[in-house]
Image (spheres, rainbow, N blue to C red):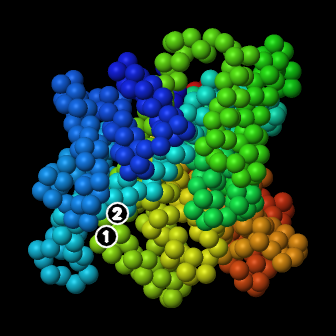
Amino acid sequence: MSELVLKREVSSAAVAVGSVLIVVQLWLLFFASWQPLVAAATFLTMVLVLAFWTYPSRHVSFDLALSALAFVPVLYMISDYDAFLARSFFATGTDALVVLLLLALIFEAGRRAAGWVLPAICLALLAIVTLGNYLTLPGLPSVTEGRLLAMLGMTDQGIFGGTLRTAAKWIFIFLIYGQVLQMAGAKDLFTRVSSLFVRRFRGGSGYATIVASMTFGSISGSNVANVIATGRFTIPQMMRAGVPPVHASSIETVASTGGALVPPIMGAAAFLIAEYTSMPYAAVLKAALVPAALYYLTLWIYVWSLSGRLGLERPQTNSAPLVEPETRTRLAFRSVFVLGSIGWIVFRVLERHPLEYAAVEAIGICLLGVLVTDRDQFKPTHLRTQIASFCVSASTVVIACALAGVITGTLYISGSGLGLARAVGDLGERGVLLALLAAMVVVIILGLGVPGIASYIIGASLLVTPLVNLGFDPIGAHLFIYFFALFAGVTPPVAITAFAAAGIYNHNANRVGWRAFWVSIPLFLIPFFVMTRDGLLLNFDSWSSLLSQITVTAVGLMAFAVAVAGWLRVRLSLPGRVAAAVVGVMLSFNVATLTVIGFALLATLVVLITVAPQRLTHHDDQDKAIDPDLTTAPNH
């Protein structure tokens, strides 16, 4: 079973439904001329059925009943479509029952596929809005049940709104593209090539993890899928090199989280940002380049520092080659088609070709590569594996997008969305940092247990406008939200990305979650820098100002990474780590005096380490007291 199935055995019924979904949705996208509302409802119906069989209950009859009921809303809609639209301002009794049924089906599918967090948020919002009809309390919104249900289930402002249409039009295509890349050997290509380049360095297995997760994650767009796909190989490599299990899983977690930030694909987010902002795709790539580079530079320095702290040795230069000549030849052929398909998408989008058509053409290039390099992938067993992986990804992401439509629709009709925007704006008048912190908290809460791309769509619909009204760059605001939508996967208590990494080799999930969060702390600063330093978006007046902003930001983040990992030529004692963190803090502010103080403190720290290292170092027992995870012996 494929790694992307996340250790779930997908039934043949789910595979059959997934196959039908792929065929029908491709037909709807490229050949049919159905009404948008009907097309969205048909897509959601099929995904609901897919979710019920991909995440089955203990009773087959119950799943059969739910699958049958899933067809009721769309059949009701098309039975008299014009009259249905005419009633969309206020639902009748029958309309209300059908919409309630649809909501119940979505909540149940969401509970199974995406966890309890997002359905609970939806239910809480609906309850608050409904209570406003019966309680008169300041700030409590009030919308009649008929109007609320009509908006959610009978218009394009609720369940069938922009989030679901985005999933049907673009995310769906990229989920297929990700599976076809798997068939073409993208994961094996990225993992092996990354190991070839960095395996001679001390901590090379950690660097290989960074490169493999970065490259594969840009295409997959899913933190969890990235962890499972690459972690199965990178985590044991790090453990064999001497990295403790919890640390190995946390490094994989953080490396996989950032993959969806890397241009040119960014897990399809680059195209969504370009669409939402009406900016050229090239402008999004330019803006995302430096933040992504800073993310992985910071993680690279963390791995370097941790490797020194653990005393890892460089691999022997006479070790056997990682890839045999025959394998290298096959990888070379695969790279032509894998990288060619990525380049083709970028080229076509830059030429303003529709994204969905460019993605389908790229899928064709990959399938041609499979035909040339590995025809066995077309055997029924292999095709079943890929479709099973698609079933898990599609049901999780699309149902999350439907739930996102419930949230955005409820906030829109109740006016709470405007209230949230006003609250962020009011905080911004007191200080932009308060507004950014509030936006961060909202996005992380909405993203707990939710796929990053779905969480981003929710956050963007709610928070981009108030952030732009505060004077922030539109693309920067989208990147800010996208960063924290992904960071929700490493934020306890529902750190789903970390839990997926821990589950690969049965490491302690809570310890991996908190360790990954600890490693991510310096990375949480990058979105704030993006919003306050235009040079990081490559918006600059002069090359000197650009280089100054990038240099100061990079050095500050590297100082934070050293403080978190705890090594800079020597094992840093607690005062030494605090000093490194203070350097990072000083360089975090756009104040010339503090910047000078930060660099002076950094120079002092380096001199002390060189001249009198005993003042800033400690012994093994103290090291283990600071980091209990070091007491767990790695598996060699």
**Residue 136 placement (x, y as % from top left):** 14, 81
Q: Quadrant of residue 201?
A: top right
Q: How far is disc 1 from disc 2 in space, using C-alphas? A: 6 Å
Q: Does any portion of residue 59 appear in the rendered image?
A: no
Dot 2 corresponds to which residue?
409
- Say which residue appears at 32% left-offset and 28% top-offset: 53
Callout 1: 10 Å neighbours few (<14), some, many (20+)?
Answer: many
* Residue 276, position as x, y percentages in the image: 57, 62
Taking 233 as reference, is 485 above or below it? below
328 and 373: which is toward the camera = 373
Residue at the spot 61% in from the left edge and 15% down from the top edge? 377
Q: Image point 48% across, 39% down: which residue?
A: 32
What residue appears at the point 82 percent right and 34 percent down from the top-left corner?
A: 197
SS state under label 1: helix
Which residue type does callout 1 highlight?
Ile
Closest to the observer: 80 or 522? 80
Percent of width and height locating residue 589: 68, 78
Q: Nearer the viewer, residue 352 or 464?
A: 352
Please name the amino acid that badge 2 sits on: Gly
The residue where tag 1 is placed is: 413
